[in-house]
Image: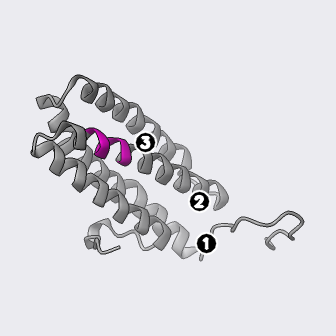
Amino acid sequence: MSTRLPPELTVGFEEIDRHHRRLIDLMDAATAAARNGDLAAARAGAAALGDELVTHFSSEEGFMAEALYPDRARHKAAHDLFLQDYAQLGKELEAGLSDLAVHWLTIRVPEWVKFHIGVNDVPLGQYLTARHFRPEQPRATGAKSRPS
């Protein structure tokens, strides 16, 4: 992927940074569609971004649980709150490309994502990196578990 993360949005844990690059690409596409007044593309972009957010949050929550991250409850609560807010954006887009929907896609969502990365994901990345954490790989049936 060609998207480069600015230093302040790089968490130092490649699996999370890879997700963030994808999120930024999708966010940029949804933002461009909204700015161009393209309702169909804005809806498609918001849906794709929403799907990627769910995947990303689930992945992070798995890392936090597996690594016993001490701040995982607060971090997950931030994910849950944002997804509730994001659902409202979907409802707004159902009605059309209102000024509110454009504002959410061009200002509110990018600001939240950047804030969340800086406040929540950077410390998580530092925690995982400091512990040399590697997510469990899916195992074939009957495979031995990873040593603790």
| Placement of the N terminus among the 4 image quadrants | bottom left
- SS type, badge 3: helix
Q: Are marks 2 and 3 in contact (CB under 8 Å)?
A: no
Q: Are marks 1 and 2 in contact (CB under 8 Å)?
A: yes
Amino acid type of the residue tagged 1 in the rendering = Phe
Percent from the top left, x then y, of residue 85?
35, 32
Residue at mark 2 to residue at mark 3: CA–CA distance: 16 Å
Q: Please provide the residue range marked out in magenta.
A: 43-48
Residue at mark 3 to residue at mark 1: CA–CA distance: 22 Å
Relative to the observer, which residue lies in front, 7 or 45? 45
Identify the disc placed on residue 63. 2
Q: Which residue is mark 3?
A: 78
Mark 3 Cα within 10 Å, few/some/many (few <14, many 20+)? some
Percent from the top left, x then y, of residue 44?
31, 43
Q: Earlier in the sequence, mark 3 or mark 1?
A: 3
Left or right side of 108 for 70 = right
Q: Which residue is mark 1?
A: 133
What residue is shown at x 32% (from left), y 31% (from top)? 90
Amino acid type of the residue tagged 3 in the rendering = Ala
Q: Earlier in the sequence, mark 1 or mark 2?
A: 2
| Placement of the C terminus among the 4 image quadrants | bottom right
Q: Is residue 45 above or below residue 138?
A: above
